[in-house]
Image (tube, grey):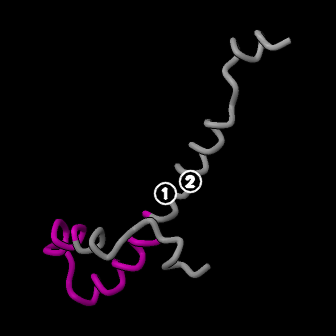
Amino acid sequence: MTDSERSYVTDKDVELFRDAFGDHFTEAEWDYLAPEFRNMLNEMIEREVKKATVRKNVVPLAEYRARP
């Protein structure tokens, strides 16, 4: 699986970020920041997905105690 296949961040997301903050950066800075931004967001989303997966598998205490 390549990075682009597992990417949660689309090119549109990157463009929205550039539209919002692009005035603060030169073109050279943006060329460096765009992939960094994509990687940072992917890592953040991946952590949240893992947390959600773990939480979904957790049994509430009351339900656990009610089991025979």
**Would you identify the image quadrant in which residue 41 lies?**
bottom left
Q: Is the C terminus in the top left, top right, bottom left or bottom right quadrant?
A: top right
User: So how many labels did they put on this image?
Assistant: 2
The residue at 29%/84% (across/down) is: 29
Contact, mark 2 vs mark 1 (Cβ under 8 Å): yes
Q: Residues within 10 Å of mark 2 (few under 14, many from 20)?
A: few
* Distance from Cα at disc 2 to Cα at disc 1: 5 Å
Q: Secondary structure at mark 2?
A: helix
Q: Is 6 one of the magenta-colored residues?
A: no
- Badge 1 amino acid: Met
Q: Does 36 lie within the magenta span?
A: yes
> Which structural element holds mark 1?
helix
Query: Residue sitting at 76 percent across and 17 percent down?
Result: 64
- Measured as percent of width and height from the top left, residue 4 is found at 48, 79
Q: Which residues are magenta?
A: 16-41
The residue that disc 1 covers is 44
Task: Kindly indicate the quadrant of the structure image that contains residue 54.
Answer: top right
